[in-house]
Amino acid sequence: TGLQDEESWLNFINLYEGNLMYFKTIITLINKNYDGKVADFLAENILHLPNKMQSHFQEIFNHLSPTEQEIVLQLSKFEQSISREELRQSLNLSSVDFNNGLQSLQQRYLVTKIKNDKRLFQLSSVFREYVRNYC
C-alpha cells in the first residue's frame, strides 16, 4: 500500500467504516498528496470525499426512491443515532412507505440499526458527509 504510520491505521479504518472501496480511493489520495503518511492525513481532521467517491455517492443517491431520499435527508441532520419513533414522527410518510424505505436503506448498508434497548438508526457517516455537502 505504501502507507506509513501503522499506529494510525485503525483510526483510518474506523473513519472510513472498514469499506474497501473507500480505502482504495483514499489510499491513493494519501499516497499522492501526503507521501503515504496516514497520520498527516488524519491530522487534518476532515472526512475527505475525493471525486471518485462523490460520483459513486451521487449515483447511489440518484437511484434511491423519493421515500428513501427523504429518509436519508432527514437522517443526515443528526450526528448521533435517532430512534425509529423520532425519525418516523419527523417525516410525512405512511407507515408502510417509512418501513419499506428504512428496510431498503439498511439492505443497501446506508443505514444501520444500533443494538440497544431502543430501536436506534443512523446513516453511514461517510454517506452522511456526502449528503450534507452535495444534496
Image (cartoon, grey):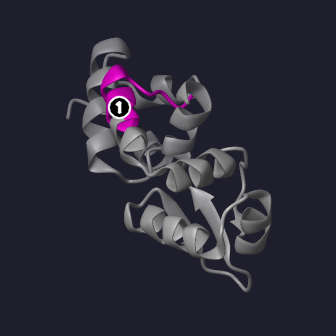
Q: How many numbered circles does the render carry?
A: 1
Residue at which label 1 appears: 53
User: Looking at the picture, how far across and down is residue 20, in whole percent?
Assistant: 27, 48
Viewer-closest of 8 and 47? 47
In percent of the image, x 73 and y 49: which residue is there? 78
Viewer-closest of 110 and 61? 61
Of all residues shown, which one is farthest toward the left? 1
User: Looking at the picture, how far across and down is residue 66, in whole percent?
Assistant: 51, 49
Tag 1's secondary structure? helix
Q: Is residue 6 visible?
A: no
Q: In which quarter of the image is residue 94?
A: bottom right
Q: Is residue 2 visible?
A: yes
Q: Is residue 56 above or below residue 114?
A: above
Viewer-closest of 12 and 6? 12
Amino acid carrying label 1: it is Met
Q: In which quarter of the image is the N terminus?
A: top left
Magenta region includes residue 49: yes
Label 1 crowd bin: few (<14), some (14–19), many (20+), radius 10 Å: some
The magenta stretch spans which residues? 45-58
In percent of the image, x 71 and y 48: which residue is there? 79
Q: In which quarter of the image is residue 132?
A: top right
Q: Quadrant of residue 107?
A: bottom left
Q: In this view, does 76 lie above or below 49?
A: below
User: Looking at the picture, how far across and down is residue 60, in whole percent?
Assistant: 36, 43
Q: Quadrant of the C terminus?
A: top right
Q: Is residue 62 above or below residue 33?
A: below
User: Looking at the picture, how far across and down is residue 46, in whole percent?
Assistant: 57, 27
